[in-house]
Amino acid sequence: MTHPERRDDDEHRHPETIRPNRIERRRAKIREEIERNRRGEYTVPTWVLTLALVLVVAGWLALVFLS
């Protein structure tokens, strides 16, 4: 026996209806990120800042010890 509520749920689970929603959410997320970056709200990831600091310190130490 099928229930009308269950059949409605099954209609929403078809890949052809899920995929456009997923794609639209992804596009909206990218669009929002681009808008934030254009407003100047872009932040550098922490790992990039850490890498830059390590490179500067390593270069300075190399300069001091190899001179």
Image: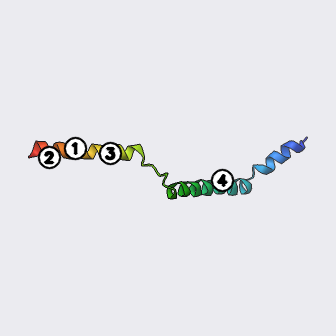
Q: Which residue is mark 3?
A: 51
Q: Local crowd at mark 2 within 10 Å, few (<14), some, or many (≥20)?
A: few
Per the model, the C-alpha gap separating discs 3 and 1 is 10 Å
Q: As shown in the figure, which amino acid type bears the numbered disc 1?
A: Ala
Q: Which residue is mark 2?
A: 63
Residue at 26 percent across and 46 percent down: it is 55
Per the model, the C-alpha gap separating discs 1 and 4 is 44 Å
Residue at 38 percent across and 44 percent down: it is 47
Per the model, the C-alpha gap separating discs 4 and 3 is 34 Å
The answer to whether residue 46 is left or right of residue 38 is left
Q: Which residue is mark 1?
A: 58
Q: Which residue is mark 4?
A: 22
Per the model, the C-alpha gap separating discs 2 and 4 is 52 Å
Q: Quadrant of residue 23?
A: bottom right
The answer to whether residue 46 is left or right of residue 27 is left
The answer to whether residue 59 is left or right of residue 25 is left
